């Protein structure tokens, strides 16, 4: 049980208009650091232009204010989640397996000199697309893929909670569905929903 107090902000990160409200809420709290739903290797990913919508923008804003950003996500779980999104897209009929295979072929083509960051982005994309196809071998139904998504989400939350508790992180911003589940393990944190 956590005895320290803090602020847990749940956001609907598909809405970029909320960014200013989240920044204002955090600046009012005057934090030294803020834990965000970002993979621990987010700076490496940022260098090769792989970003997490909303949270990378929030991180940049906080960094500009001199606030340290602490990423909460296990990079492997983050990558699995990215691949799971493609697998779910196939299960829902939003994208075909053939399209994912075509994308793998596209990112596998290199002509002449390729800048290192472009090469790294292509390798990353191929890895995610290939993992999506592997997930579809396990489950290609919407229900099965959603079950994998649920298990993945709980793992990601447990990983983040361990970091919050072990490092005494008092200001946390994650997607609202994660915050909803995490609040029960952070009873002394004030939970704010910004959606």
Image (cartoon, helix red, strand yellow):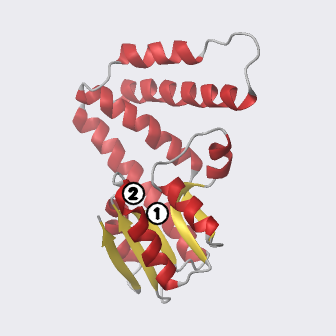
Q: Is residue 103 left or right of residue 141?
A: right
The residue nearer to you, when weighing 4 against 191, is 191
What residue is disc 1 on?
158
Query: Can residue 33 be seen at all in this image of the molecule?
Result: yes
Compared with 25, 107 (above or below) is: above
User: Are the two marked residues, 1 and 2, in contact with CB atoms closer than 8 angstroms?
Assistant: yes
Q: Which mark is residue 137?
A: none
At which x and y percent is residue 11?
36, 63
Q: Secondary structure at mark 1?
A: helix
At which x and y percent is residue 45?
63, 44
Q: Is residue 27 left or right of residue 115?
A: left
Image quarter in which the C terminus is found? bottom left
The residue nearer to you, when weighing 145 against 88, is 88
Compared with 135, 11 (above or below) is: below
The residue drawn where x is 58% and y is 80% is 168
Q: Is residue 96 left or right of residue 79?
A: left
The residue drawn where x is 24% and y is 30% is 92
The residue drawn where x is 52% and y is 80% is 170
Q: Mark 2, residues whose alpha carbon is within 10 Å: few (<14), some, or many (≥20)?
A: some
Q: Which mark is residue 154?
A: 2
At which x and y percent is residue 86?
39, 31
The residue drawn where x is 76% and y is 16% is 113
The residue nearer to you, when weighing 119 against 115, is 115
The residue nearer to you, when weighing 75 against 20, is 20
At which x and y percent is residue 76?
56, 45
- Whole-Å distance between the Cαs marked 1 and 2? 6 Å
Query: Can residue 140 be seen at all in this image of the molecule?
Result: no
Compared with 76, 179 (above or below) is: below
């Amino acid at each position: 049980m956590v005895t320290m107090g803090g602020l847990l902000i749940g956001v609907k990160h598909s809405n970029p208009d909320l960014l200013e409200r989240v920044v204002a809420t955090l600046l009012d709290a005057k934090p030294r650091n803020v834990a965000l739903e970002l993979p621990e290797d987010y700076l490496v990913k940022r260098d090769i232009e792989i970003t997490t919508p909303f949270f990378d923008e929030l991180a940049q804003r906080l960094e500009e204010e001199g606030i340290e950003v602490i990423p909460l996500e296990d990079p492997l779980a983050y990558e699995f989640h990215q691949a799971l999104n493609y697998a779910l897209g196939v299960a829902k009929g939003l994208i075909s397996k053939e399209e994912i295979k075509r994308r793998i072929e596209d990112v596998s083509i290199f002509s002449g000199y390729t800048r290192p960051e472009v090469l790294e982005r292509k390798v990353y994309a191929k890895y995610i697309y290939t993992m999506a196809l592997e997930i579809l071998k396990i489950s290609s139904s919407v229900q099965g893929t959603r079950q994998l998504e649920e298990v993945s989400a709980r793992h990601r939350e447990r990983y983040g909670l361990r970091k919050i508790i072990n490092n005494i992180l008092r200001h946390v911003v994650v997607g609202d569905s994660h915050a909803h589940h995490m609040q029960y393990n952070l009873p002394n944190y004030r939970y704010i929903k910004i959606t």
